[in-house]
Image: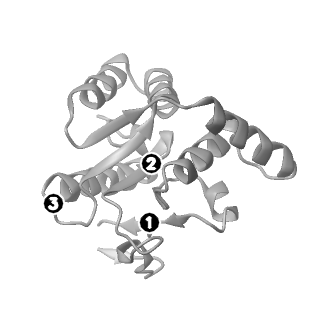
Amino acid sequence: MTVADPRRDHFKPYRDRYTPVVCTGPKFLASMFVSDPSNDDERRKERFADHLLALIQNRELPYSRILINNHVVDEAATRLKKKHSFEDAYDCVDTVRSSDSIEVRTLSQNTLDDAYETFVSFDDHGGAMTDFLNKAFVERTETPYVAVWDEHYEAFDDLRLLPNCDYA
């Protein structure tokens, strides 16, 4: 494993306590379920996401589960169905619904309001509303650790992104 940015912040306590969860964005969640990656980048992302999930399931990391919101599931399944296959989308939703390693929460009105406020204040930011929804969700759940493929999250200084790893 090669770590592009050897940060170790994801193993440190957040607000003086350890968190048992890590959040993901929709592209990261979708990459766990791509059955036939079409290029090297997709293969790299699929391997990393799959490896992270295996480490979580085997309790080899301080995270015991992945925390996502219903919007992330919707975006990931839609992305898989449009860009890959219905079977990949089905596998994603079915796994999310039945997995002990993945917890889904519904976005609250307060989370939506927080996301809207940030979205409006970052009017020059290239991120989609989904990025702002996920940022607000992470903050509301006090889960600072995020596994995403979107570079837009780098602009959110208060979030800790997991290091981007490559697998040969």
Residue 128 seen in render: no
User: Element under label 1?
Assistant: loop
Three-letter amino acid code of the residue under disc 3: Arg
Three-letter amino acid code of the residue under disc 1: Leu
Looking at the image, residue 98 lies above or below residue 155: above
Callouts 3 and 1 close, C-beta under 8 Å: no
User: Element under label 2?
Assistant: strand
Looking at the image, residue 86 lies above or below residue 76: above
**Residue 89 spot, x, y in % from top left:** 37, 23
User: Element under label 3?
Assistant: loop
Write the residue at 49% across / 23% down. Answer: 78
Residue 53 seen in render: yes
Q: CA distance from mark 2 to mark 1?
A: 10 Å
Task: Give the quadrant of residue 156.
Answer: bottom right
Write the residue at 46% across / 76% down. Answer: 4
Q: What residue is pinned by disc 1?
A: 162
Q: What residue is pinned by disc 3?
A: 59
Q: Is residue 48 left or right of residue 116?
A: left
- Going from N to C along the chain, the mark reached first, 3 or 1, is 3
Between 89 and 24, the one lying in front of the other is 24
